Amino acid sequence: MVAFCEAAMALIQNTPNTALPAIARPRRPGKAFHYDDIAKVVATLDVVLIVASSVVSGLLYHWLAYGMLIDPSQSIGVGLTLAAAFVLVMSASGLYQPTALLSFGTQFKSLFLAGIGIVTFMTAVAFFLKIGGDFSRVSMGSFTVLALSTVAVSRLVWRDQLRKAMSHGLFQMKRALLICGDSFNHDRLAEEVSHYGMAIQHVLRCPNDDFSSLAGAFSAGIGFSVDEVLVATPYGNLPHVDTLLTELRALPLPIKVVVNDFAAELVSQPIQHIGGLVAFEIQRRPLTLTERFMKRAFDMMFAAMALIALAIPFIFVAIAIKLDSKGPVFFRQQRRGYNNEAFRIVKFRSMRVQEDGDTVTQARRQDSRITKVGRFIRATSIDELPQFWNVLCGHMSIVGPRPHAVAHDREYDQMIRKYTFRRHAKPGLTGWAQINGHRGETPTLGHMEARLNYDLWYIHNWSLFLDMRIIGRTVLEMINSKSAY
């Protein structure tokens, strides 16, 4: 046993750091800001910004309303109370962790909900305690807007600066020991974990992925100059890692198991407990009753306002189409919607030829079928706007997988097994795939599979906030996109 321990220790100590990417090499202790301290700094800055927003809004309100400045102590007290509640909520949600700070979408949604929720709760408490008269509603409203705005801007800055700092190795990284099979690509893992404050300092390989060969070594007292242990294994080898993990628990260090491929996808799904068993939710039901109500209410309100606002522009587009070429103003084509239900989609006509049958040819660049006006309204997506009527009628949603011609659906149903899953949601005017570069023609099967993956991700991760985010990005895409023709 002693001989084995010495051999294992030699293996670990002789693994050269030069085999790892430069970004993963740890810096000397004390020479850089520690990665784990980021959360404390961000939380402290949040307190400063919220208190400052409270003071500024209070002073500004009294100066504008009464022409005088007041003692800021009350504003400081309110700011500190709300800041403490905000920091507690964000900390409990894990939103101060550096990995969470890199996702601005998650941060924006969470800080907005937390901020509004805390202010609403505190306002209700003040009302029941009959101290609401001491606070101006205008001042509180301006404070809420200012605080959320400044914190949101700070999150944008933090995200960008964290990315730059990590790419330049400016943080003192956590040192890790990696235990893996001889077939595992540790270079890739080293690069991945380096973005999350960790550096692979030592690598211990197990021949033929036989982790049982290390049994007894760690409990025998092997010492490590590391802060964490990573065990990387393929899915099929997980049962053989159990003995090693039992041995590793003798070490007073955090231990993580790294999996890839199918196992990584599996464990990232929501978990449900069924008695003493654990189940992974591979596919959720197509929205609950409450979610469907929220989405439908939003769709109807948005579509109705859009149709009213666009009524006059629609008249000018219709006139331009009639003057440009012979044919109807609108183009109607059969599509398949939620649960494969048929409906007729409405567009402004942009082509001389109207295809709707067993064979439908996708539009291409320099397509001779496209009219002069049609080329403009397709490039700007104006031709899609009449589909607000389909949304109002309930055939479509504002956001969802884009509906394809029935002929194309039949074709891809045969070629891609998961293709039918995209009809688990109503089709949309815009979608997650479209704002991620998968708009327009799909010349190869690979292009359609890439679009499908985005559609399925949207269906599985739907939220009303995600819909609003997609709508906002769609507006920018309509201005800047070069993929429509």
Image: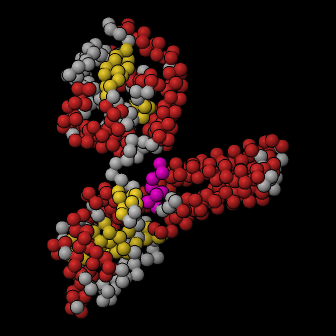
Quarter occupied by the C terminus: top left
Whether residue 430 is visible to the viewer of this picture, yes or no, is no
Between 27 and 446, the one nearer to me in the picture: 446
| 246 relative to 399 in the view: left or right | left
What residue is shown at x 38% (from left), y 12% (from top)? 329
**In this rendering, would 75 be left or right of 260?**
right
Residue 333 versus residue 176: which sits nearer the camera?
Answer: 333
Residue farthest to the left? 208
**Residue 408 in sight here:** yes
Q: Quadrant of the N terminus?
A: bottom left
Q: Residue at x 33, y 61 (%)?
A: 192
At a point 25% along the width and 31% down the height, the residue shown is: 409
Which residues lie in the magenta part?
A: 98-106
Q: What residue is rendered at 19% in x and 72% in y?
A: 209
Q: Position of residue 232 (x, y in %)?
A: 27, 68
Q: Is residue 334 left or right of residue 114?
A: left
The percent position of residue 273, horizontal first and vertical second, equals 40, 60
Please state the horizontal and vertical placement of residue 21, each as a whole percent of the image. 29, 66
Report the predominant secondary structure element of the magenta stretch.
Answer: helix
In front of the other: 313 or 16: 313
- When asked about the image quadrant of residue 280, the answer is bottom left
The relative height of residue 475 versus residue 264 in the rendered view (above or below) is: above
Q: Where is residue 425, by image quadrant?
A: top left
Task: Determine the residue located farthest toward the bottom in the rendered image.
Answer: 2
Is residue 297 rendered to the left or right of residue 82?
A: left
| Residue 238 forms part of the magenta stretch | no
